[in-house]
Structures are given as C-alpha cells and as structure tokens.
Image (tube, grey):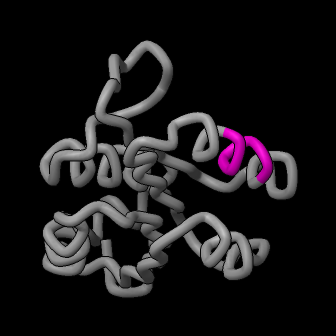
Amino acid sequence: MNSQTRILLIDNASDRKERINALKHRGYAVFPALNLEEARSRCLRGGYDLIVVNANGSHEQAAQFCDDIRRQCPRQQLILCSDGASGSDHTVAPDVSSVVNAVESALNRNAKPADLASAA
C-alpha cells in the first residue's frame, strides 16, 4: 500500500503510539483520534480507506459506533479491536501485530489486481 491509503485509528490506550508507528512504518497515512466523539466528527463519506476502532474497555459503544458508520456509509471498511476478541464476532486483538495483519488483510482484500501487482 502507498502513503495515499488513509486510516482513521480511534484509540486511547496507553500503547496506541505503537500501533500508529507500526502502520506509518508500512506506509499508511494514519489519522489518530482519542475517542469516538472526535472520530465521529471526522468521519466524512469516503474520507478514509479504513477505520480502526480500539474498543479499549468500551466494546458496546465501539460496536454501536461501527454500526452507525456502516449505516451512513455501507461500503466503509471497519476493524474493531477488543481485548476479548475471539474472531467469531469479527473483532481482532488490539496487539500491534494483530492490528497490522487485520489492516493489511482488509486493504488487500479490496485492492484491484493492478494495485497488488504494483505493491509486489
């Protein structure tokens, strides 16, 4: 992926800078938000290629936020991170490697064949 890939990372955990730096290191443009209210005001249709939400103890509110975004923009890609992630509820663990893998998987899943060839 190139630096034009825009990711909104909603994360107020103490280790959020690790996730931000890991994604930036891979060439993504990361726009951090500390809370759902701040993120909601920045979620314009098509503004981000991907929105990553670290529930960080507020899983119900984070899930509701994702549902709201999905209703407003059904094609918006979302990743929900939660400490209790089991995979069965479409969440991932908030550790750096799990988040990076989920981001790359989500973005590659929607890449066009020409994009994948240029990334190789």
Q: Residue at x 33, y 25 (%)?
A: 84
**Is 6 drawn above or below residue 22 in the view shown?**
below
Seen from the viewer's position, the closer of residues 61 and 69 is 61
Residue 27 drawn at (x, y percent): 24, 80
| Residue 92 found in image quarter | top left
Residue 57 drawn at (x, y percent): 41, 42
Q: Which quarter of the rendering shows the N terminus?
A: bottom left
Residue placed farthest to the top in the image?
88
- Dominant secondary structure of the residues highlighted in magenta in the image: helix
**Is 114 drawn above or below residue 28 in the view shown?**
above
Residue 65 is inside the magenta segment:
yes
Q: Residue at x 42, y 31 (%)?
A: 91
The part of the chain drawn in magenta is 64-68
In this rendering, position of residue 14 left or right of residue 102: left
Seen from the viewer's position, the closer of residues 8 and 105 is 8
Residue 20 is inside the magenta segment:
no
